[in-house]
Image (cartoon, rainbow, N blue to C red):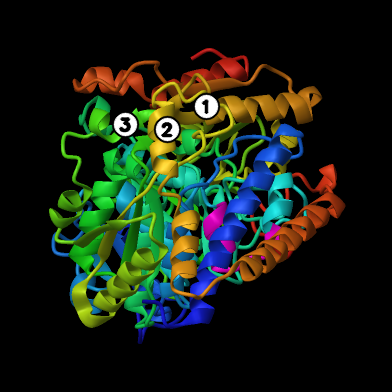
Amino acid sequence: MTGTAPQARTTTTYREALRQALREALARDERVFLMGEDVGRYGGSYAVSKGLLEEFGEERIRDTPLSESAFVGAGIGAALNGMLPIVEVMTCNFSLLALDQIVNNAATIRHMSGGQFSIPLVIRMATGAGRQLAAQHSHSFEGWYAHIPGIRIVTPATLEDARGMLWTALMDPDPVIMFENALLYNLEGELPGDAGAVDIDRAAVRRTGNDVTLVTYGGSLGKTLRAAERLGAGGVSAEVVDLRTLRPLDMPTVLASLGKTHRMVIVDEGWKSGSLAAEIMARVMEEAFFELDAPISRVCSAEVPIPYPKHLEDAAIPQVETIVAATLRTVGRHA
Amino acid sequence: MITDRPLALKLLREMLRIRRFEEKCAELYSAGKIRGFLHLYIGEEAIAAGAMQALGPEDAVLATYREHGHALARGIAAERVMAEMYGKYEGCSHGRGGSMHIYDARTRFYGGNAIVAGGLPLAVGFALADRMMHRPRVTACFFGEGAVAEGEFHESMNLASLWQVPALFLCENNLYAMGTALERSEAETDLCVKARSYKVGARSVDGMDVLAVMQATIEAVATIYAGGGPQFIEFRTYRFRAHSMFDAELYRSKAEVEEWKKRCPILGYTNRLRAEGLLDDAALAALEAEVAAEIERAVAYAEAGTWEPVEDLARDVYTARAA
């Protein structure tokens, strides 16, 4: 981006924005390194780290064997010992093999040590369904991980966040898991030439509206915004809140929107039972029950392992149509 | 023949400190002062006492839930370890960890991990960081033989060897993973074979002989510094007490325990020092008195310690942020 006027906008993709964030972090601090399966020679299974091996070398773009527990644990150990590691777990589906390290070590060591040690680690992983990859490659575990105190969960859903969340996450002294919905990698758009670090504390209102608040995050943001457009054409003014960080939740932003619209629909690709959507509902009940003019509704994944056939997969996860339908019910209108 | 008398006595002192500390812990557990799980190191003292002599202050140490001995031998004050047993704020982990989670930044002691084999991947990362930053250090990771059944052991051995990181894997083979004997859980009971299969240099030594432990660890550290890659040592040892305070010990015979007690690391070493003229009754009594006073101070310190206010419950889950 050198030579570009600061405010000039460049066309880019979510993938390139992530790569630019990685490149910046690696160039900025010698303690930063990237490790994971196929991040080097292969260029990243989603091509996020393509070209970085040539630029930064094998020490810092470190291919690992298929040993999720060991390399995630090694990331934790390296972070405890002065490094700023970025660990790529190819997809959240495989992160279950590293769950012990994430839950029992990354999330607990600061607390168990009485605050003596920080773990400035970022774990990146792809998430989500929608590519006919069937049950074992289509999980959405963002909400699951958000259950655990001691880790921070971020879900970049825009180019700005893909570009800017990584550095802020690395500078955070505590472990951060960054979920990248795999359907977003090809997302195209423009970024200012001087795009850089963004906060990872606040939810963002991505579209303003007065009739209903649609709360979502990650891969469902695009669908929710499209649903809001369609609702707008039908005379329903929907505000869209992108949570951005799932733990800790920015409830003030959610409640501020509710205070304006008094109705809420939550869109969450996780399974409905015990979902993040359930948590947000519960908090609204606890903190703002009397703001509600109607029951909150949820658009979540159906309670099935994600099936292979396209029509069944589509039916299993949130879609623009189901978001529109749920919203119309919530505002007392029928399509 | 031992020539360095101060070192010889230091090894004895370290083992005695651990033995008496653990005996006191068992007593305090019965008295309700220490709660939760309590895993005593009695019988295995020679390993922590001997191995620590090979490490420098900049090296990192990781251990398991049976780590009181390692903490003491590493140089964490007995007062702070005992206060941690009590759960007092003055404990080395401010009471948040308890007996299984002793941490200490000053001595680079990184737990206290209560998941079997959970510390091994961390050790690989510690050693990787040192290698990447060109710091002349080793990372010592203690674990029991039960860990070799876990995938994390195998993944970590491979990764450490693949990346040639300065990690020292110290396996305390006390023959039982809780109540399961090694031969009832492993098809291959030769632990060094497992390490060597990952091209990790391995040796097996008598874990009841503090001098052998020290010597083997010094050699392994030297091998790492000489470019030999990560090293594995199996210390053959035995736990004299139950696995934890809840263990009725139905899985091993009293005769077997008694047989191993004859090989008590402290008894054997004391006799050896006497035979070599380095220790007499008066010196031993003085040493015992010194250790007893230290343990007494540790208990008094823990007793006088404070309970963290409940208002601070949520402290140290995340790093406090500037508003």
- Residue B234 screen position, x and y as percent: 29, 54
Residue at the spot of label 1? B247
> Horizontal and vertical percent for residue A240?
56, 39
Provide the residue designation for mark 3: B181
**In x, y percent, where is residue A85?**
40, 65
> Who is closer to the viewer here, A99 or B85?
B85
User: Residue placed at 59% from the left, 42% from the top?
Assistant: A149
Q: How many marks?
A: 3
Q: Are marks 1 and 2 in contact (CB under 8 Å)?
A: yes
Q: Main secondary structure of the magenta part?
A: helix
* Magenta span contains residue B105: no
Q: Name which residue type carries label 3.
A: Ala
Q: Label 1 lies in what chain? A: B
Q: Which residue range is magenta in the image?
A: B68-80
Specify the quadrant of the image occupied by residue A135. Answer: top left
- Callout 2: 10 Å neighbours few (<14), some, many (20+)? some
Q: Is residue A116 visible?
A: yes
Judging by the rendered image, the residue that carries numbered circle 2 is B178
